[in-house]
Every structure is written in C-alpha cells, then in structure tokens.
Image (cartoon, rainbow, N blue to C red):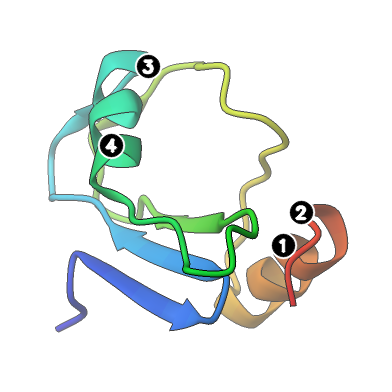
Amino acid sequence: MSTPLGLMQEQIVRIVLPRDRHLDEHSATRLAARLQVPRSGSPLAVLMDVTDVASVSDFKSGPARYFTSEPEAVEWLKENSHVR
C-alpha cells in the first residue's frame, strides 16, 4: 500500500487520496498546506493519485492533466512544471 503523502523525487510529491472521498478546492487547499517546500526553495510538482476517489471538482491549481500511467504522469510533470 502506498503512503498517503510522500516525496517521489526531489521536487515531485505523490499524494494518494482516501477512497470514496470528494476532492474540491477546499480539500486541495488543505492538502497543499501539508506540503513542505524543499530547502532549495524550488517549486514542487504534485502527482495526485485519485484512483478510488468518489469525485473531483474543478479547482484552480495550475496546469493539471489525468493519466492512467504513473511514469507518463511523472514525465509530463517534469516537462510542464519546471521540476527535475
């Protein structure tokens, strides 16, 4: 089982959302508050696993895209969020 919040790579954080929960702007804001900025002060990219989430509503979080492959998602994050 994956941990709910973890650092995948230096600047990519992976979040596994709880099963049957609803994700909205308020929930996303609370999740973002739990993230820690790396010591370098560089931006973070977030890979959010929404596999068993009940619903996801639109929220203003920056560029976002859905994937069925985690490696493809990580590659997209690297290309579109200025992380390594």
Q: Which comes before the other along the chain, label 2 or label 4?
A: 4
**Mark 1 Cα shell of 10 Å, populated few (<14), some (14-19), many (≥20):** many
- x, y percent for residue 36: 34, 56
How far apart in space, not on screen, are marks 2 and 1 (Cα)? Answer: 5 Å
**Mark 3 Cα shell of 10 Å, populated few (<14), some (14-19), many (≥20):** some
Q: Which comes before the other along the chain, label 3 or label 4?
A: 3
Q: Which residue is mark 2?
A: 81
Q: Which residue is mark 1?
A: 77
Q: Is residue 19 left or right of residue 29?
A: left
**The disc labelled 1 sits on which kind of residue?**
Leu
How far apart in space, not on screen, are marks 2 and 4 (Cα)? Answer: 19 Å
Q: Which residue is mark 3?
A: 25
The image shows a total of numbered marks equal to 4
**The disc labelled 3 sits on which kind of residue?**
Glu
Circle on res. 24: none
Q: Secondary structure at mark 4?
A: helix
27 relative to 21, above or below: above
Query: Which image quadrant for residue 37?
Result: bottom left
How far apart in space, not on screen, are marks 2 and 3 (Cα)? Answer: 20 Å
| Marks 2, 3: nearer the viewer | 2
| Residue at the image position 36 percent from the left and 50 percent from the top | 50
| Marks 4, 1: nearer the viewer | 4
Circle on res. 33: 4
